[in-house]
Image: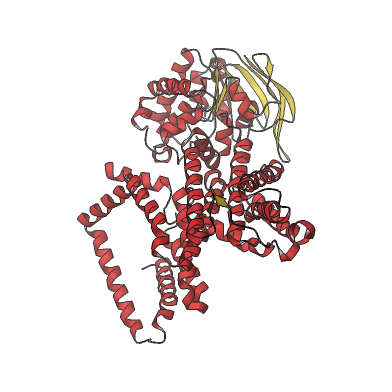
Amino acid sequence: MNARSLGLSTFYYLGLLLIVLPFLKGNTLYLPLFFLALWTLRRTAFAGEQNRTFVRLRARVDRAVIGNHKPLLALLLAGAVALPFVSSNYLIDVFTSALLYAILATALNITVGMTGTLVLGFIGFYAIGAYTTGILTAKLHLCGFWTALPLSGLIALCFGLLLGIPTLRLKGDYLAIVTLGFGEIIKIFLNNLDSYTGGPNGILGIKKPTLFGWGLDSLPAFYWFCLLCLVVEIIIVARIFASRYGRAWVAVRENEMAAAALGIDVFRRHLLSFSLSAFFGGCAGSLFAVKQGFISPDSFTFLESVMVLCMVVLGGIGTIAGAVAGALLLIVLPELLREFALYRMLIFGAVMIAFMIYRPHGLVGSRAIALEQEDSLHG
Amino acid sequence: MLSVDNIELFYGQVHAVKGVSLTVNAGEIVTLIGANGAGKSSTLKAISGVHPTKAGSITFRGEPLQSLPAHAIVGRGISHCPEGRRIFYELTVRENLLMGGFLLSGTTALERLETVMELFPRLRERLTQLGGTLSGGEQQMLAIGRALMSNPALLMLDEPSLGLAPLVVEKIFQRVVELNQGGLTVLLVEQNAHIALGISHRAYVLETGRVILSGQSADLALDERVQKAYLGG
C-alpha cells in the first residue's frame, strides 16, 4: 500500500468515524463491530470487483439506467408529484426549498457546466428576482405575482447583460472575482436602498398567488407549483443543450480558440449563457419571495452562492440531472441530520469530501463518462 | 487571393510578427517554414482573426479582413485548423464536425457532413465516438474535416504533422494534395520542412518574426541556407 492510498483510507475511516459517532450516542462498544462490518463489506466488494460475472451484471444495470432514462424519469416525477400525500408539512417545506435550489442550480449549471465559466456571485441574480417581485407586489402594489414572475426574470437578465458585456471578456479566476464582487454589491445595495428595499428589515407581506381562483397558499399546492416550474425549466434547458446552440456552448467550454476559428462568436455565446442563467436565477428568486412572504438581504449571502455552486459540482457538472440531484442532496441531507445538531455540519463536510474523493465527477457524472461506459461494453 | 501586407502582432510585450508580407494565389499550396517561435502560427492567427494585429493589412478576395472578428472571417471563406488539433473531446465526432459547419443552415451542414465523411472514411466509422477517444491521426483528420465543413476557399493548416507517426503524416499530406487538386487553396505551416517543401508550390521562410526567404518550393529545397537550417543537409 503506497502513501497516497494509505492517506486516502485513513481519511475515509476518519470521515466515517465522524458520521457514525453521533449515531452511537456514547455506546462506543459498538464501534469496533461497525468497523469490522465495514471492513468485511469492502472485502466483499473487492472480491466482487474481481468477479467477471458480477462486473458484467453491474455494467448491464448501469447501462439499463443510463440507456432507458425515460421510465426512470417518469418514476421520479411520479414520486415527486405524490410526495405531499405521504409526508409531513415540515418535509414538504424542505422539499419545496430543495426544488427552488434545484431551479437555481439548473440555472447556474448553464454557465458553470455548459460554457465553463466560474460564477461566484450567482445569488445576486436570485436576490434581484426576489426583490423585484417583493417591490412590485408588496411595496408598490403595481402588479400581481403573474406579471412579477417574468418581470423578475427579465430584470435579472438585464443585470446579467449589464454585468456580462464588460466582464465576460475576462477569463477564469478574474471573472469569478468580478462576479463575486457583483453578488456583494447587490447585497450592499439592498441593505442601503432603504426607501425601496426596506434596508436590513427587508420586505414583508409578499402574498402567495392564486391560479385560476385556486390559491397556492397551502404547502402542497405551492410545492406542486415549484415542481411545475422546475420541470418547465428543465425542458427548456434540455432542449437548448441538445441543439446546436448547446453544442456551441460545449465547444466554447472545451476550446475557445478552436471555437472562434470555426465561426462561433465566443463572446456572444458566453453572454447568452450568462444572461439565460441570470433569467432563470431571477425567476427562482421570485418564487423564493412568495414562498417566504418575507425577504431580507440576509437570505442572499456569499455562502448561498457557494452552496449553489456546490450543488452543481457535487451533482455532476454539466448535467441537468446532476444539478437537481446536487440540490436535493445539499438541502435534504442537512435537514435530515438536524437531530445531530452539533455534528450536523461536520457530517455534511465529511460527506462532501467523501464525494470529491470517490465520485470526482459528481453524483450523476458527466455524459462523457456515461458514453465511455457504453463504449467499453460494446467494444 | 489572399495578400498579407506588413502585419505586426504582439503577445503583450512580445513582438511575435515583425512586418510579415505574403501572398497566396488561388489553387496554390503555400507553406510557411521556420523554427519554433519564428511567427508562423502567429501569422495564421492574425489572418483568421483569432489574435488581433497591431499594424498592417490583410486582404482576402479584395476585402480587408484585419478589422473583422474571427467568426466573421470564417464566413468569408477562410478556415483555420489550429495547431495541436484542438478538437472537442467531450463532443462526438459527428458533433465536432457539425460545429465546423456552425455557420451553415441545417440541411447544407448535413450535406457537407457527407462530403467530409467521404474524404475521411475513417471518421464515418467513428461517428458516434467521443472526440477524445480517437487516436492522434484520427484526431488530426477530424480537425481537418471540421475545418473543411464550412466549405472554405482557403484552408490554413497549422502543423498537421505534430506528434504523428511518419506513415500517418504521409497519409494526411497526401489527402491535402488531393484536396488542393480538387481546387482548394492551402496555406500550410509546418516544422517538417522536407515534406512541406515537397508538396507545396511556393514557400516562405520565417525567422524571428520576419520573412527571410521566399520563392518556389523546389528552388528553396535546393537553397543552401534552407538546407543547412531546416533540411539537415
Describe residue A128's horizontal placement relative to residue A273 as left or right: right
Q: Quadrant of residue A200?
A: bottom right
- Residue at the image position 26 percent from the left and 50 percent from the top: A60
Residue B132 x/y as whole percent = 43, 40
Q: Quadrant of residue A9?
A: bottom left
Compared across the picture, whether A50 is left or right of B209 comes to left
Residue depicted at x 48% and y 36% = B87
Give the x, y percent position of residue A153.
62, 46
Q: Is residue A316 visible?
A: no
Q: Nearer the viewer, residue A161 or A178?
A: A161
Residue A3 position in % (x across, y down): 42, 68
View extreme (front): residue: A213
Colouring chosen for the image of the structure:
secondary structure
Between residue B40 and residue A155, name the one nearer to us.
A155
| Left/right of residue A280 with respect to residue B173 in the rendered view | right
Q: Quadrant of residue B189?
A: top right
Q: Residue at x 22, y 57 (%)?
A: A54
Can you say whether A251 is above or below A190 in the image?
Answer: above
- Quadrant the N terminus of chain B occupies: top right
Relative to A148, is B198 above or below? above
B99 or B200, nearer to the observer: B99
In this rendered view, identify the residue nearer to me: B230 or A25. Answer: A25
Q: Please provide percent x and percent y for residue A353.
A: 47, 66
Q: How many marks?
A: 0
Picture residue at 37% right of the left edge, 56% below the top:
A79
| Residue B167 in view in this figure | yes
